[in-house]
Image: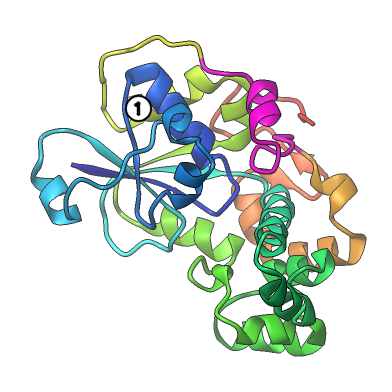
Amino acid sequence: MIIWLASYPRSGSTFCRLMLHRMYGINTYSKSGDNFFLANDMSDTIGVAPLPRHFDDLDRDDAIHFVKTHDLPTDNRPAIYLVRDGRDAIVSYTRFLIFHAQTNAKRLRLFKQAFGLLDPRTVMWHLVLPSLGQAGWHARFQHPRTLPRALLKTHDRRHGGWGTHVETWHARPAPTATIYFAHLIQNPVEAITGAMETLNLAPPSANVRPPTFEELHERWPHFFRRGKVGAWRDEMPADIHEAFWQYHGETMTRMGFDKSGLVSPKWSPTMLSQIG
């Protein structure tokens, strides 16, 4: 049986995988592979493993197989969906993409720099604007600096943009347990346990202490960068924030966020105050 661990990039899926590994001794898989974790000696800590068989074979298995994906949904398999304030996710994803672009060979770095792939404002604009359809191109003609990046085969095309990603995963008829990033980092055991109960799952507990974010940051600072709710306040320029709210504000409101931060979402009556 496959259960998706789905999220827009930089919304907590790695920490969720780590918690599943520590709480239940579960290794998790990735639809797109885990080369980054393998290359950075992170696989044992996170609890990742290569896909042992084809998806269809895993579905026939009685065991539970958690598979991470950042793609838009294509089926109605059960899912744990991680949602983070879209502004924080985009700020974090911007830094992550630039870090990867900077670590390429010099010739490739120069190419990426020429197309604005090392410029935080250009990358952030690209991630904020709609990615699909006529609305996306219209928005990019209003912000010409994002056009060269849009013409390349960039990461965000298959994700569909933050709002589209959240909406399409929640529109499916399949059983879906939503975990908010703020809940996950404040009380990871409660967040994971609640999601498992929602999906009627009860794997035996391994009861291993999870590492703190500070410990993870010390070992892998470029990946576990800040882990903070509300980082957008000092990293997202005001004009980009206004554009983000124009294109994603309805989804933000529907998911329990307002323009200033987190507002008492229905998912947790204990999270009544803003964090960050």
Which one is in front, 144 or 46?
A: 46
Q: What residue is at 31 percent from the left and 27 percent from the top?
A: 26
Which one is in front, 89 or 268?
A: 89
Residue 259, placed above or below residue 117: above
Q: What residue is at 30 percent from the left and 54 percent from the top?
A: 173
Which contiguous range is marked in magenta? 210-229
Instruction: Let me know if residue 207 appears in the view.
Output: yes
Residue 103, placed above or below residue 26: below
x and y percent of residue 233 in the render? 86, 46
Q: What residue is at 26 percent from the left and 26 percent from the top?
A: 201
Q: Say whether residue 218 is magenta.
A: yes
Q: Mark 1 points at which residue?
A: 196
- Type of the residue with mark 1: Met
Label the magenta part by its dominant secondary structure.
Answer: loop
x and y percent of residue 104 in the render? 65, 65
x and y percent of residue 273 in the render? 76, 26
The N terminus lies in quadrant: top left
The C terminus lies in quadrant: top right
x and y percent of residue 141 in the render? 76, 90
By what rule are the colours in the image chosen? Answer: rainbow
